[in-house]
Image (cartoon, rainbow, N blue to C red):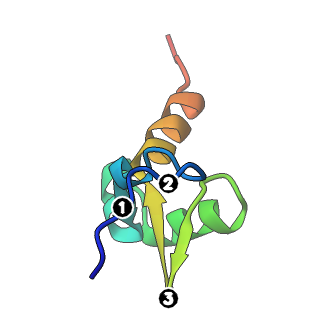
Amino acid sequence: MMPANTNDPEHPGLAQVRFLTVAEVATLMRVSKMTVYRLVHNGELPAVRVGKSFRVPEKAVNDYLRSAYFDAG
């Protein structure tokens, strides 16, 4: 396996991106995997397709949760 090219001008910092599985995202968000799939398919949560599965950038999950935060107080 070739190491990631950290000097790729088209994808700066891509080697530092941490990708999560749908199951990991579901656990982190405390929702079902089906809810995560729905968010991905609706375009609300960006993801990368790897074979037949999806990987979600950790930052995308954090951004989604931050934007969806609702102060009930």
> Marks 1/2: CA distance?
22 Å
- Disc 2 designates what residue? 8
Residue lying at the far right in this picture: please name it. Answer: 42
- Mark 1 or 2: in front is 2
Q: Which residue is mark 1?
A: 20
Depth order, front residue of 19/21: 19
Q: Residue at x 51, y 72 (%)?
A: 34
Left or right of 22? Residue 45 is right
Residue 28 position, x and y percent, is 32, 51
From this view, report whether residue 48 is shown above or below residue 65.
below
Q: Residue at x 43, y 45 (%)?
A: 13
**What kind of element bears circle 3?**
loop
* Label 1 vs label 3, nearer the camera: 3
| Residue 26, image x, y percentages | 38, 60
Say which label, 1 or 2, has the lower sequence index. Answer: 2
Q: Are marks 1 and 3 in contact (CB under 8 Å)?
A: no
Alpha carbon separation for disc pair 1 and 3: 15 Å
Q: Is residue 30 visible?
A: no
Residue placed at 59% from the left, 30% from the top? 67
- Which SS class for mark 1? strand
Mark 1 or mark 3: whose residue is earlier in sequence: 1
* Three-letter code for the amino acid on which mark 2 is drawn: Asp
Judged by depth in the image, the label closer to the viewer, 3 or 2, is 2
| Residue in the foreground of this view, choosing between 58 and 27 | 58
- Kindly state the secondary structure of the residue where label 2 is placed: loop
The amino acid on which the numbered mark 1 sits, given as a three-letter code, is Leu
Q: Quadrant of the N terminus?
A: bottom left
All told, the count of numbered labels is 3
* Residue to which mark 3 is pinned: 51
Q: Residue furthest bottom?
A: 52
* Residue 32 horizontal/vertical position (percent): 43, 66
Closer to the chain start, of discs 3 and 2, is: 2
